[in-house]
Amino acid sequence: MITARKERADSVRNRAALLAAAARLFKEAADPDTVKMADIAQAAGAGKGTVFRHFSDRIGLVRALVVEETQQLREQVVDGPPPLGPGAPVAERVPALMAALLDLKLNQRALMLALDRAGTGSPYLNPAYDLWHSEVAGMLTGVHGREDADYLAHALLAAVRSDLVEHLTSQGASPGQLHAGLRRLCASVLAHGADDGV
């Protein structure tokens, strides 16, 4: 029994070390494809087999790291104080969440690109997307009705897709310009409700 507990504790520590090493390497990477499983293992002081035992493959590691890196934002959106958390007016909460998502894509550029390229076949199939879509659609339902809110939530989230953010920044757009455009987009969506025929 004592040995089993020690192994579990070691496993938890190894997983945490691997995620920390992966987070650092993705943060430093200009291109997510340059971050290899062997590099992560070496940076964590572990064998490559240890990485695969914990995460199965690169997709599993990227998904686990995204969950780790977005945990605080997810908690703020679900249970935190306004404007990200429940209780703020929709006109404040939607722009706050979209700005937070844009910051996430800007600050975790390589990791978020890695998730989009992680072999899911679609960025809409990653686990985090469902949460963001559900939250934005829920906020917009009172403004636009359920069916329109579902589509408009997808449209807003498309504005902070990693590949679009990467394209715009590579063309010289600054974070300030991206945020300004996103605020205008949110304002436009929120200004026209279901009664306006949207």
Image (tube, rainbow, N blue to C red):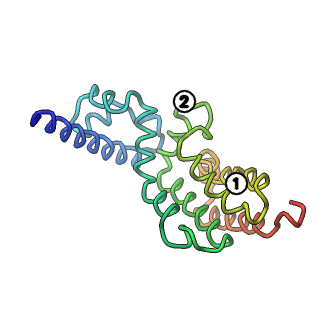
Most extreme residue toward the right is 197
Secondary element type, mark 2: loop
Report the number of discs: 2
User: In screen coordinates, is 133 left or right of 152?
Assistant: left
Q: CA distance from mark 2 to mark 1?
A: 24 Å
Q: Amino acid at mark 2?
A: Gly
In-front residue for pair 8/52:
8
In-front residue for pair 75/63:
75
Secondary element type, mark 1: helix
Quadrant into which the N terminus falls = top left
Q: Position of residue 183 (x, y in %)?
A: 68, 67
- Vertical side of 75 occupied by 110: above or below: above
- Vertical side of 151 occupied by 141: above or below: below
Residue found at x 84% / y 63%: 194
| Circle nearer the N terminus (2, 1) | 2
Most extreme residue toward the front is 1
Q: Position of residue 81 (x, y in %)?
A: 49, 72
User: In screen coordinates, is 41 left or right of 197?
Assistant: left
Quadrant into which the C terminus falls = bottom right
> How many C-alpha atoms fall within 10 Å of the one at disc 1: few (<14), some, or many (≥20)?
many
Q: Which residue is mark 1?
A: 153
Checking the image for residue 5, the label placed there is: none
Q: Amino acid at mark 1?
A: Ala
Most extreme residue toward the top is 49
Q: Position of residue 171 (x, y in %)?
A: 64, 52
> How many C-alpha atoms fall within 10 Å of the one at disc 2: few (<14), some, or many (≥20)?
few
Q: Position of residue 176 (x, y in %)?
A: 60, 67
Q: Which residue is mark 2?
A: 119
Residue found at x 48% / y 40%: 31
In-front residue for pair 65/140:
140
In-front residue for pair 50/21:
50
